[in-house]
Amino acid sequence: MKVAALVLAASTALAACASDEASSGSGGGGSEGGSDEPRIGLAFDTGGRGDRSFNDAAVAGLETAVEEHGGEFRDLSPNADASNRADLLTQLADEGYNPIIAVGFAYGEVIGDVVEQYPDTQFAIIDSSAEEVGAGNLTGLLFAEEQGSFLAGVAAALKSETDHIGFVGGVESPLIQKFEAGYVAGAQAVNPQITIDRQYISPAGDFSGFNAPDRGLLVAQGMYEAGADIVYHAAGGSGLGVFQAAAAAGKRAIGVDSDQFQTVDDPALQAVIMTSMLKRVDNAVSAYIDSYVDGSIEGGSDIVYDLEADGVGLSTSGGQIDDIQDQIDDYRQQIVDGEIEVPTTP
Amino acid sequence: MSVLRRVGLALFAPVLAVVVAVLISSAVMAALQVDPLRAFEVMVDFGDTPSQQVTALVVVLNRAVPLFLAGLAVAIAFRMGLFNIGVEGQYRLATVVAAGVGAAVVLPGPLHVLLIVLVAMAVAAVWAGIVAVLKVTRGVSEVISSIMLNVIALGIASFLLTGPLRGSPEGASIISTAEIPESGWVPSLNGVLGALGLANPPRQLYGFLLVAVVVGAVIAVLLNRTRFGFDLRAAGLSPSAASASGVDSRGMVVKTMLLSGAVAGLIGLPDLLGSTHAYTTDFTSGLGFLGIAVALLGRNKPIGIALGALLFAFLDRALVPLQIQDFPASVVTIIQGTIVLAVVVANEVARRVARRSAERGSGPAAAVAGDGSTGPGQSTGGPGAAGGEGTGAGVSRTTGAGQRTDERQETGA
Amino acid sequence: MATAGTPAGAPAGPSAGGTGAGGGDAGAAPLAVELRGITKRFPGVVANKDIELRVRRGEVHAIVGENGAGKSTLMKTLYGEHRPDEGQILLDGREVSFRSPADAIAAGIGMVHQHFMLADYFTVLENVVLGSEPTRGGRLDRATARRRITEISERYGLGLRPDDLVEDLGVGDRQRVEIAKVLYRNARTLILDEPTAVLVPQEVDELFGNLAELKREGLTVIFISHKLDEVRKVADAITVIRRGTTVGTADPRTTTARQLAEMMVGTELPSPEIRTSTVRETPVLQLREVTVAAPTGRPPVDDVTLTVREGEVVGIAGVEGNGQAELVDAVMGLRPLATGTVRLGGDDITAWSTRARREAGLGFIPEDRHRQGMLLDAPLWENRILGHQTRPPAVKGPFIDRRAARADTARIMRDYDVRAPGPDTLAVALSGGNQQKLIVGREMSARPRLLLAAHPTRGVDVGAQGAIWRLLEEARAEGMGILLVSADLDELIGLSDTLHVMLRGRLVATLDPSAVTPEELGGYMTGAQTAAGAA
């Protein structure tokens, strides 16, 4: 037993230390930051760089910005239980990085104290509101995920042959519930009688649902077997399992955050990705850097990236939704015009 | 002379552990084409200004406090041969309930804190007690039942957080319990830092540090100086000998698990009462599992666990500066893991060396040693057999008087 | 100093070669095993010094000496478990150097340990091949293994059936499995470590029959023992070890047991005989119709009724595994009774916990001191506390009184001649005899009303054995009641006032120890002889 305990402890110790992001390292721009070139700091949440989705999109935005304005950037990953989020921010600030971008709503809890401590540094936080903090050096970068998801729901309802679709959420958190709410509203706008299976992989507080492809596969498999022919996932890394289930069942799926048709390597999986609900974190990040460079940042406020601002939308790679593009555009216009009000909670 | 020898042996293990850890991790770093000297330099560099240095110290201490408590909770059970892998679920459930209770009542300062602490200890102790009851009444291995109860505890915690104890507004991106009023907070120790002539850092040093020190001291006394502790340790060293000496093994399992659980209930409180003041969806998780590693690192002794927790916290803090200094995050985690593993290995080596020297140092008066009946475990010629039996026996130890033949296998394996 | 000059083993062996020649003498058959000047030191201790040993091929060579004399260290040297600091090991005249037991096995040396190392739920075949399994295509080749085991069993008269579960075997059979295991690995020289310690007389005779078979097939046996009568019966030559060195060799046919004993310890043999009866009227322990149930099969203890009075030693004889261990557990409260009552003095303690029983004056010398008597990884002073956690001098209120416990441990070490550096020494560092003396001292110090002594002198040397016997006699004279469970028939007959024989869980005979011989007693124990004798 002693040996067993030792082995177990050693492995947990290793596992605890190892968050499996691929690699970090120095950022893009080669030139040493000149005085007016930005040195940008980026703090990831767990899951970190290499998720081919949300976090990588933020890096892509930075790379674009650095290409345009020069400078350099530095990205940091937290420890396994992400208990050191505040340290990441303060370290970046201490090292003189400015502006600093916190990726993920979880930073909302700690960023208030940090921005107070470094009044001369500009901060941005993705997916969390800056208005409640009310500090002049913090900007919230928010997305109208429900609007993009509404269009995903429209596309799914139009394309479904069985009038039965599904939604797989990673973690039952308010953020993911926004995806669910928009998707359901969109689908029902097209077909009020449509059957929509909705399921979350893990409950609130248990973040394993974002990184459990095996469980994503099981959940989606159940939906396909129950008759759904299109499943939309908002489950981060678990989405891969949803695609695998779709491929195995010969059905289709909708990706999330980035254009997953482009980022998934396997052609077999590519074939099942009908479209992806884009969340243009890259656009938001590069636009934020642009405004930092030209000095137009208005602190203390939120910038909402919605359909109108092209902050969210549907991808068209693979051409599977080309035939319904007109109807989608029609709904999009109605949302932009305010004729359709998309709910944010299911 | 014998005192010198004892001190020497006591120091031998940690010194060897550090040396081995440094050597192994240097080798691994070299293999990864990372300069070990530079890496160690970055790890021990706590910053330039006094404020930065004290902040780094506070970060390490704040991280070490919950890890220490987690290690302690695991170690209490280990000392009697129980593997409480359920510390994780115990503290998560305890923290959410304590946060809910703390937010629901208003009491004068110390009483409010005391109530929260007692609620947390009670909830975790009850949860751990289920494991004990299943074991003594139904013979369920505590490893299995506590893993199962972890899953259930997380489910209940999640239900409570999103349901009855939800305090955050609908649609907020982080779900949390209602905030505990200020009377239920544990004040920081930054005043003490000031009194010591240290810079006052922007970070709050958890006041719970003192509680952890007191708990550690109480547990140390309890284990080493009391009858209860003697019974507990005897049951861990040899369940059969303890039973024969009059220790009620079933009662001991229950008491030990309750104690282990009660300490586990404290794990979440440094963060809860020192900084977050509410249980949220992002409340630090995984401390229960880290506690297992910390306990083994500290060889289940309170002082060792404190050192182990500090080592973990130190390595954790080093993660950020190493990344800043261009060490890839993946390399950093490899370094961390290697150091921990090396310490565990070195610990074990040191323990064996110490034991061997004890075995050899027999009866100088008689000028003889190595009598046949001293070392049942030494017979290398044994078949190395009965592996399955051996582990089984470990799990079902408290079921009582096994047959003599079982004993033979254990010694042979 | 070694007395290597003593004529070695005189004319005993079949090949009476020149004794001084050793391996270099090519003319005579070379010695199977020869040790020259072996010295083994451990820090601060010399365990073996100038050991000289000459064992001829095809003989049974006994090594006798007190426990702690260094026999086991010597055998570990020969079996490759550690390397000697000085001296040479020669096998068949060639010098060898073993780095591990694997080397020794490869050189044809096999060891049968005193404590068997068998997996209960495996068959004989599986146990024998374990560790050197014949494989064919990665799978256990049972056919080959069965053929070889059957062949070995027939050739040496071991009578093993390859498919029997070891669990179902008796002690003697288990020992033969161990022997088969060694033979399976092609051993030419077998080391048997105290092989008779666990056997009853009939089984001992069987074992000696097996040894004769081995000898006839040309194998060499090194036989470690301190039972001098047995040694004289079976050995062709004897080497005596005392205090880590060889003090001489003897011819079993011309040396008496008493002479051998004097070589071993330099003093006269202790005798367990009790001269006068000290039995008083008051009963201290009364068992009434005690039955211990087993989940399946017959109850291990079946309707046992007996009484121990003050100043009386009641002996329980029986072949191991006939319920003695369960009876002991039942008296200690470690095993629930199905029916019956246990009274200690005037109290009915049937439902009492073990701790309450101990506090009420029950002392316990367990059968297996490693399992039930000691915390091997704890210092001696903590072992002093074990079993007396609630009584002075170990405790002060809820706290352990370390100082008093240490002081009292030092006292026990003095009074009971426990040889160890000090109270802080780990128990594991002591020899078996010293461990046992500590246990006896500890239990006696609490002045129990009834002492439950299970195999109190098992595996201890002659010196300690005599000391323990004397202590039991003194305690008895002072009025302590003693329930003695033992496999040593001399001990039972010599110490007991009343002797019960236990067979298949029942008390089948009550004998007068002054009127029974070991052979008769053995007959009752195996059920060969039946009588409802009156005490």
Image (tube, coloured by chain):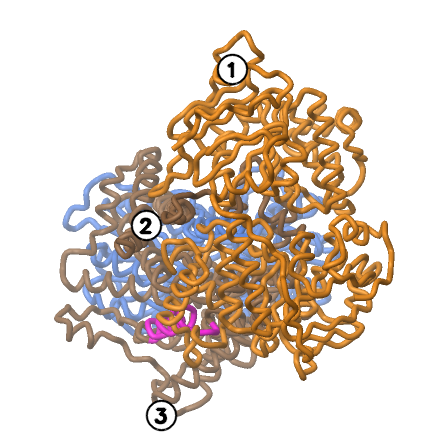
Chain colours: A blue, B brown, C orange
Q: Position of residue B17 (x, y in %)?
A: 33, 47
Crowding at label 2, few (<14), some or many (≥20) Cα neighbours within 10 Å? many
Where does label 2 land, which residue?
A75
Q: Which residues are magenta?
A: B211-228
Query: Considering only vertical position in the picture, is B288 above or below C362?
Result: above
User: Can you name the residue that lies furthest to the top here?
Assistant: C27
Real-space CA distance between mark 3 and mark 1, rounded to the nearest whole angstrom:
89 Å
Element at badge 3?
loop
Task: Count the labels in the image.
Answer: 3
Q: Is residue B178 magenta?
A: no
- Please state if B57 lies on the left or on the right of B259 as rendered: left
Query: Considering only vertical position in the picture, is C255 above or below C456?
Result: above
Q: Quadrant of residue C286?
A: bottom right
- Please state if B20 lies on the left or on the right of A2 as rendered: left
Q: Quadrant of residue C13?
A: top right
Q: Is residue B216 magenta?
A: yes
Can residue A198 be seen here? no
The subunit carrying tag 3 is B
Real-space CA distance between mark 1 and mark 2, rounded to the nearest whole angstrom:
73 Å
Real-space CA distance between mark 3 and mark 2, rounded to the nearest whole angstrom:
45 Å
Image quarter of the C terminus of chain B: top right
Where does label 1 land, which residue?
C93
